Amino acid sequence: MQAVVNQPHTQNTEAAYFRIEGKVPKFVIMFLESAFKDSLKIEKNETEDDEESIRLEDWDWYKEITASMTPGDAIKADRGLRGWTQKVLAKKLKISVQNLSEIERNIRPISREMASKLGKVFGTSPSTYFKE
């Protein structure tokens, strides 16, 4: 799969163009869609893996970021990728904004039940939000 962004000039900015090839994770596509809207073009290549390609999960910087990411960070990132406010997510989870804020700041622990709710709301694995 290939994601290409061709962002035209806008006032006081330069045109942006970049290309990502290989296996593009769903969360990257979601971020690009939210950030670049109509300027994003996604093409699926019929060829198999490129021998020169490196899976995102194998990059050292990705491993470092995910290793240091707390469950609260993951919630904040997933919420941000969707453009949701804390109020929107709290309503979907049926909790108060204050509770969500404490969860995102890692003050309030995430129960298995809450991890399950988060997984359903974001369409991801509950294990992303629950650490033993």
Image: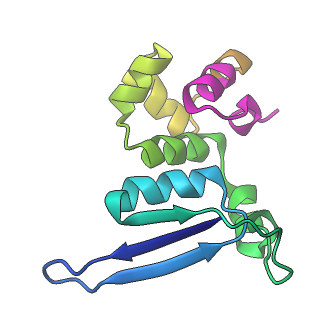
Residue 91 appears left or right of 56: left
Q: How many marks?
A: 0
- Residue found at x 66% / y 53%: 69
Closer-to-camera residue (42/121): 42
Residue 79, placed above or below residue 54: above
Residue 107 lies, in percent from the top left, at 56, 34
Asked if residue 98 shows in the view, the reply is no
Residue 103 lies, in percent from the top left, at 54, 32
Q: Quadrant of residue 97?
A: top left
Residue 126, placed above or below residue 112: below
Residue 85 lies, in percent from the top left, at 35, 36
- Residue found at x 27% / y 78%: 8
Verify whether residue 125 appears in magenta: yes
Residue 17, placed above or below residue 117: below
Residue 126 lies, in percent from the top left, at 72, 29
Residue 114 appears left or right of 130: left
In this picture, which residue range is highlighted in magenta?
115-132
Closer-to-camera residue (108/130): 130
- Residue found at x 44% / y 33%: 101
Q: Quadrant of the N terminus?
A: bottom right
Residue 80 appears left or right of 122: left
- Residue found at x 68% / y 15%: 113
Q: Residue furthest front?
A: 46
Q: Quadrant of the C terminus?
A: top right
Closer-to-camera residue (73/16): 16
Q: Main secondary structure of the magenta part?
A: helix
